[in-house]
Image (spheres, grey):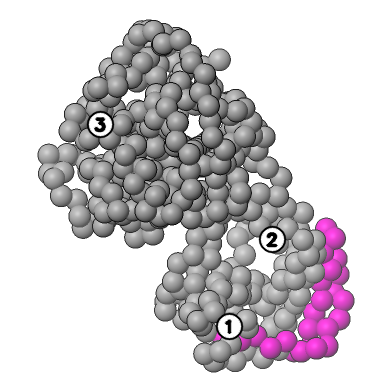
Amino acid sequence: MIGLAWPGRGQPVVCDPETGRWAFGAHAPARPVVLPDGNLLIQGDAYDALGALPAKTVRLCYIDPPFNTGNGELGYDDRAAHEVWLSAMEERLARAAPLLAPGGFLVVHINVVEQAYLKVLLDELFGRDALVAQISWQRTPDRTLLGQGSTLVADQVEYLLVYAPNGVPDGWERPQRRTPLSERTLATYSRVLVPSAEATFAGEVGGARIFAHAGYRLERAALDDFDARMRLTNQQPESTFQQALLAKMPEPGRLYRAEYEQARGKHKGRRVRWYLNGNVVLWLKDIAEREPDGTLVRVADWNNFWPAEEVPATGIAREGGVTLRRGKKPERLLERIVGAFSRPGELVLDFFAGSGTTGAVAARLGRRFILVEASAAHVALARSRLERQGARFGFARC
């Protein structure tokens, strides 16, 4: 097996409660911890706290560990030796693994400094096949790149390493993003297709039944023609099934309809598609939805790049009513993660809790949470934030 080797691998790593720095050293003997029911905030080292939590109960474990940037002025110490940082992550992630419920997800937030090493370490611990995605989040937009003049290539991106150690559960809903529909996109769906009712059977390909319509009309779309707005596009040549369908549609100027069962993918189930002059008909309703107030939004499956315009990190200094210098993550980011990888009522774990963003978002979205944080100052911020939001939680020390 391909893996990492480093000096001191396998040695325990402890966190100095005064400075917050990690160093090789022996863990103190475990002591019994009484955990209250419901939501929970724990003050203590993640290693100790994880050993006290019940196995197979966590649907989503999200962590935002120290990035090991060498910066000592972040409100926490971020200057561990490389081998110490790797050892600390390994033993804590190994303790977190048994806590994941069947079908659970792990999301680790990191930047470029340790990303490559952490990715290999996660592959070792959870398996390469467990990787769902590496998402790149553009934390800083181009127009606000201040203070990076000495950097040859500006560092704008952080990463979310998403793992499903037991595989993505069957039927798990695909995460989607919703953004305002641009006028430019709307303008491309400028026509309405009106097919004739009369159609004749024109053949069958791979279980798809093809019908040729007697006639059709293309009309300019009106403002309220949302369901019928369409455009034409070429079918990609690598789609052998679609090319086989088009081969059964030889007459130019004739509108064809194909009906078939799609076995997998986003449109699994019965499908009806329309074809005209070798082109496929695309419908606005397949990429957009109308909100209750009438506005149109673009709905698309997630990809692995989240631009700053979609998930901004600006203006979050006082978000949640607490201030955490540079280490704070925006609630909008956690809303995406918690919303996609857990369901209402399920348990979310964050054992580098910082100012409690994960818990605040989880409570608002109807999830249960367990937060673990070593810094007493950060625990105070998290308690204040959760209490201000009205979240109910218990408190314990490890």
328 and 234: which is toward the camera: 328
Q: Look at the numbered disc 1 and give the secondary structure of its residue.
A: loop
Does residue 55 sit above or below 29 in this rendering? Answer: below
Position in image of residue 138 (x %, y %): 34, 49
Which amino acid, mark 3? Tyr
| Residue 132 visible in the shown view | no
Asked if labels 2 and 3 touch by Cβ distance under 8 angstroms, the answer is no
What is the crowding at mark 3: few (fewer than 14 residues within 10 Å), some, or many (at least 20)?
some
Determine whether, in the image, residue 71 is placed left or right of residue 62: left
* Residue kind at label 2, given as amino acid type: His
For the residues marked 3 and 2, what is the alpha-carbon distance in whole angstroms?
A: 47 Å
The residue to which callout 1 is attached is 226
Q: Residues within 10 Å of mark 1 (few under 14, many from 20)?
A: some
Q: Is residue 235 left or right of residue 136?
A: right
Residue shown at the point (51%, 82%) measured from the top left? 294
Of residues 272 and 325, the one drawn nearer to the viewer in this rendering = 325
In the rendered structure, which amino acid carries the disc numbered 1? Phe
Q: Which mark is residue 237?
A: none
Element marked by disc 3 = loop
- Mark whose residue sits in front, 3 or 1: 3
Instruction: Kindly identify which residue carries mark 2.
Output: 267
Contact, mark 3 vs mark 1 (Cβ under 8 Å): no
Mark closer to the chain start, 3 or 2: 3
